Image (cartoon, rainbow, N blue to C red):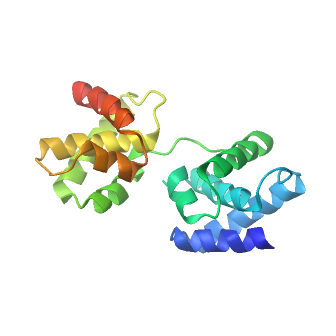
Amino acid sequence: MYGIMEIRRLVGRLSLSRSFREDACVLFETSQGEGLLHGRSIEGMAAAAVYAVCRIAGVSRTVEEVSTVAHASEDELTVAYTALNRELGLETGPIDPREYLPRFASRLDLRVDVERRARELASFVTEENLAGGRAPSGVAAACLYTAAREGDADVTQREVADVAGVAPATLRSTYQDVHSKA
């Protein structure tokens, strides 16, 4: 029962719809029935169920975003999510980097034209298959940073990296790839 209550709380804090809550609850109960909770925290599994449902639906939420509002660490969430994915064979595809752009741009208080340019860059990167195994949140961050520099927006690599939940070094290397190819 506590796991279901935690899912309800997480879904509310992440501003997700009722269908996400229902799907996450079903996934949590399935994991419980399969014995996946043994040795794992209820909070971690609840957070993993919410994260998994987001991934399945193609909704952009990072592990950091979910764990920040969860009563579980990033490690607990990741371990539980890995178990869910491995044992239940979840159909989670990669998230399109463009899905992250509105939220990241809003948090960075970037102009609409900067976000629009970042979307163009992300489309190019995606269509040309230039992301090459990189985290979609990192690709989105690099596209935003590239667009911000082109548009003379006042934002630092550190600020963009923090909003995206990636290391500044990751942002730098992805930015260099995007900037050189776009």
- Residue 58 visible in the displayed image: no
165 left or right of 144?
A: right
Vertical position of residue 156 compared to residue 175: above or below: below
Instruction: For the C terminus, give its image quadrant.
Output: top left
Q: Position of residue 16 (x, y in %)?
A: 54, 69
Instruction: For the N terminus, give its image quadrant.
Output: bottom right
Of residues 49 and 38, the one nearer the viewer is 38
- The count of marks equals 0
Residue found at x 53% / y 60% = 68
Q: Position of residue 64 (x, y in %)?
A: 51, 53
Q: Quadrant of residue 28?
A: bottom right
Q: Position of residue 133 (x, y in %)?
A: 49, 29
Q: Position of residue 66 (x, y in %)?
A: 55, 58
- Residue 99 visible in the displayed image: yes
Residue found at x 76% / y 57% = 41
Residue found at x 35% / y 45% = 161
Of residues 104 and 113, the one nearer the viewer is 104
5 left or right of 154?
A: right
Of residues 71 and 36, the one nearer the viewer is 71
Q: Quadrant of residue 175?
A: top left
Q: Quadrant of residue 57?
A: bottom right
